[in-house]
Structure formats: structure tokens, C-alpha cells
Image (cartoon, rainbow, N blue to C red):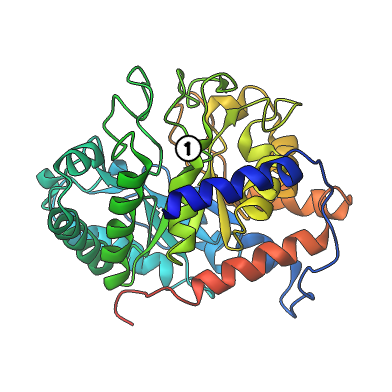
């Protein structure tokens, strides 16, 4: 009944909100906080930390954190030492948090299955795929595995997980979601059920979650890591329903955007991450979401091969993205981007009037609200 009601409501709203282009409105934005522009911009920057498994005195990453140019880090398997893995990862995270005036987002992609950074070979717990848990469809099992995972994340010092995946497994040929067993099901009710259980387990251990990939990657035929992906002919309205359910349950901490093109969402064919219609129109105005929006990796080829560095930042932030992420992990041929470069580019866009200070203030307020609910290991 809830889904039918949601579908009816959203169908009505689709006619009046979704496809009306709008500019960034100044009205309603929070008043500027006393914090500096530099600090606010820094909180919007999320970075992969390259090959580091530890940091030494004089490491430029420490200076970037200490000077407020970086608000969060993203960890990959390459950041896990081969020996004494858990203790060394804890030590790495602790050393970075100690340099931060504002608690860092410490994030990881821990979905389970094939997207599982903290592998058993390093001494961490196993985590089955979403597809396995969805097929099993046992609430106790989903809670068990996610509680075990979340306890481990909290122990290490990871406070934000890029999971659960809310994509529907509607296209069996989908190479990036369905064939990698990253979706709970093609049934939106079942996806909502297990996503909420995953979130519950994380919250029990004071770990926040990021829903992905909005507005739905399960019908795509391509991989946005490799290039532009158009879902204009394949995406269906039902792909929004798990987001609606989690939002209605009051359990949404944050949402990550997808770099997907859909001309029904945006007639200019901007990828979702860069589209005001998608982020501010669909997610904020249509679904009523007020929290933090994270971009998917801005170095994925759908973005990096089609839009310039500065232009993609300008579009994403003006679309309503609050945290821009550069994982330095998509393509070994790409020169790693630094937090200093991202910070400087955003600041220059603000000084040139291409991004309003009100938009920065808005993002900062959302980020700080989420960070106020974070737990730091040892605190």
C-alpha cells in the first residue's frame, strides 16, 4: 500500500515539478556561518589517498587536512597493508583524524560480494553480496552480516559507508550492477526491505550510510566508469521507489548521484550528477530530500572525458551536489588529483561568481549536520 501511495503521489508531482528548469534560488539558503570560505569549501572535498597505507611527517596529505582543504577520504583495498592489516589501517585513519580540525568523513565501498575492500585475506570478516541476501530474503541474515560488517567499520574508524545499493536488478545484461550482484532484487519492495535492514545494522554501530546510485543504475546497458551511459529508453519510474521508502522511514543519511544521461530527466543530456533537474528537481523538490548529496567519482570517464575539470565542478555544485569525490582510482593513466587543486578550483569559481557563496553555505550546513552525528573511533 505504501508503494502504491508513493507511486500515485510521485506521478502527480512528476507533472508539475520534475521537468521545470530552475536556477539556484538565493531565498531560503542559510545565513553565512562565521567559518571561512576556505573551510566551507574544504568540507565539500572528498579524496582517495592514492597508494598510502601509512603517512609520515611532512606528507602533503597531512598539510591539506590540517589546513582545511579536505573534508573526507575514500579508502580502497590498496590502502590496506598486507601484514598486520587491521592495526595499520586503524593507525592510518587515526593519524589523519588527529590532523583534522573538523572530523573527517572516512568512507569505503563495503557492499559485500564483489565490492568488498576489507577482505578475509587481510583478517577482516566476510560479507556476501546484496544479490545473495536478496535471494535469501531473510531479515535475520541481512542484519547478521551487516551488523558484523558495521562493527568492524566502527572499530577501524570508518564512519560512512557507500552502501546500500538501491538500484533495481531490472536488466540482466547490466554489467556494472546486476552482473556484479550488487542489487538486492528487481523488486523495489524487497530492495527497500533489505536496504533498511542494512541501514539499521550500520546505525546500531554509529556508522552512517550513503544510498546509491540515484536515480537508478539497474536498467543501464553500459558502465559510466568507461564512458557516457544513456538510460533514456530503459529507465523506469519504479527505480525511484526504494529511495522514497527509505526517505519516508526517516533512515536516509546521504545519497550518491549516478553519472547517467536520461533525456526525460534533462533535455540537455547532462549526466545526473551535473544536472540541476536531477539533483535539485527530482531528488530535492520531488522526493523532498534535504540531506547531503555526494557525487560519484568525478574521474569516471562519463565525466572526465566529456567535461572539463572546472566545468564539471561548476555544474555539479550548482546542480546541488554537496560533496565532490575524486577517488584517484578509476584510471592509472590519469594523473592523481589533489585536494589542493579541487579546493582552489572551487574557490576560483566562487570568486568569479560562477558558484554562489549561498550554495557553498548551503552545502556546508548540510555537511556539518551529518558530521555532528558521526562517531570517531576512540571517542
Q: Quadrant of residue 131?
A: top left
Residue 221, position as x, y percentages in the image: 45, 18
Left or right: 143 with respect to 91?
left
Dividing the picture into quadrants, the one containing residue 232 is: top right
- Point 24% across, 62% down: residue: 150
For mark 1, give the secondary structure.
Answer: helix
* Residue 100 in the image, given as x and y percentages of width and height: 50, 71
Q: Quadrant of the C terminus?
A: bottom left
Write down the quadrant of residue 151 in the picture.
bottom left
**Image point (52%, 51%), residue name:** 6
Residues packed near mark 1 inside 10 Å, few (<14), some (14 to 19) or many (20 plus)? some
Check the image and name the residue furthest to the right: 353
**Is residue 59 visible in this depiction of the protein?**
no
Is residue 197 visible to us here? yes
Residue nearest the observer in this picture, 117 or 176: 176
The residue where tag 1 is placed is: 238
Q: Nearer the viewer, residue 366 or 199?
A: 199
- 303 or 290, nearer to the observer: 290
Give the number of callouts. 1
Question: Is the residue 328 above or below the residue 158 in the image?
Answer: above
Left or right relative to 243: residue 27 = right
Task: Answer left or right for 19 relative to 172.
Answer: right
- Which residue is at 26% across, 32% downward? 181
Answer above or below: position of 262 versus 375. above
| Residue 228, x across and y down, in percent | 57, 21
Give percent across and percent down for residue 112. Answer: 23, 44
Q: Residue at x 54, y 62 (%)?
A: 71
Amino acid at each position: 500500500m505504501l508503494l502504491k501511495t508513493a507511486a500515485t503521489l510521485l506521478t502527480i508531482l512528476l507533472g508539475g515539478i520534475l521537468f521545470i528548469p530552475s536556477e539556484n534560488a538565493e531565498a531560503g539558503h542559510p545565513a553565512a556561518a562565521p567559518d571561512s570560505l576556505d573551510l566551507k569549501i574544504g568540507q565539500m572535498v572528498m579524496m582517495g589517498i592514492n597508494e598510502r597505507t601509512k603517512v609520515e611527517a611532512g606528507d602533503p596529505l597531512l598539510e591539506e587536512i590540517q589546513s582545511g582543504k579536505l573534508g573526507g577520504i575514500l579508502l580502497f583495498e590498496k590502502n590496506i597493508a598486507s601484514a598486520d592489516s587491521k592495526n595499520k589501517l586503524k593507525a592510518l585513519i587515526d593519524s589523519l583524524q588527529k590532523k583534522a580540525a573538523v572530523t573527517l568523513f572516512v568512507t569505503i565501498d563495503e557492499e559485500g560480494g564483489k565490492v568488498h575492500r576489507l577482505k578475509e585475506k587481510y583478517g577482516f570478516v566476510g560479507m556476501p553480496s546484496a544479490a545473495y541476501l536478496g535471494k535469501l530474503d531473510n531479515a535475520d541474515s541481512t542484519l547478521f552480516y551487516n551488523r558484523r560488517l558495521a562493527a568492524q567499520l566502527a572499530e577501524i574508524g570508518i564512519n560512512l559507508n557507500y552502501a546500500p545499493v538501491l538500484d533495481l536488478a531490472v536488466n540482466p545484461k547490466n554489467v556494472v550492477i546486476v552482473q556484479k550482484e550488487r542489487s538486492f532484487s528487481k523488486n523495489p519492495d524487497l530492495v527497500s526491505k533489505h536496504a533498511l535492514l542494512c541501514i539499521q545494522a550500520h546505525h546500531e554501530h554509529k556508522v552512517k550510510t550513503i544510498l546509491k546510485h540515484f536515480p537508478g543504475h539497474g536498467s543501464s546497458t553500459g558502465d559510466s566508469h568507461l564512458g557516457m551511459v544513456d538510460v533514456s529508453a530503459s529507465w523506469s519510474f519504479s527505480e525511484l521507489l526504494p529511495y522514497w521508502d527509505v526517505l519516508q522511514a526517516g533512515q536516509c543519511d546521504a545519497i550518491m548521484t549516478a553519472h547517467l544521461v536520461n533525456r526525460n530527466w534533462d533535455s540537455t543530456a547532462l549526466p545526473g550528477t551535473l544536472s540541476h533537474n536531477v539533483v535539485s528537481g527530482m531528488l530535492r523538490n520531488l522526493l523532498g530530500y534535504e540531506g547531503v548529496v555526494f557525487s560519484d567519482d568525478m574521474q569516471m570517464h562519463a565525466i572526465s572525458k566529456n567535461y572539463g575539470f572546472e566545468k564539471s565542478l561548476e555544474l555539479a555544485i550548482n546542480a546541488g551536489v554537496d560533496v565532490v569525490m575524486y577517488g584517484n582510482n578509476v584510471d592509472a593513466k590519469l594523473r592523481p588529483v589533489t585536494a589542493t587543486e579541487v579546493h582552489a578550483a572551487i574557490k576560483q569559481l566562487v570568486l568569479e561568481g560562477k558558484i554562489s557563496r549561498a550554495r557553498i553555505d548551503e552545502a556546508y550546513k548540510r555537511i556539518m549536520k551529518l558530521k555532528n552525528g558521526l562517531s570517531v573511533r576512540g571517542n
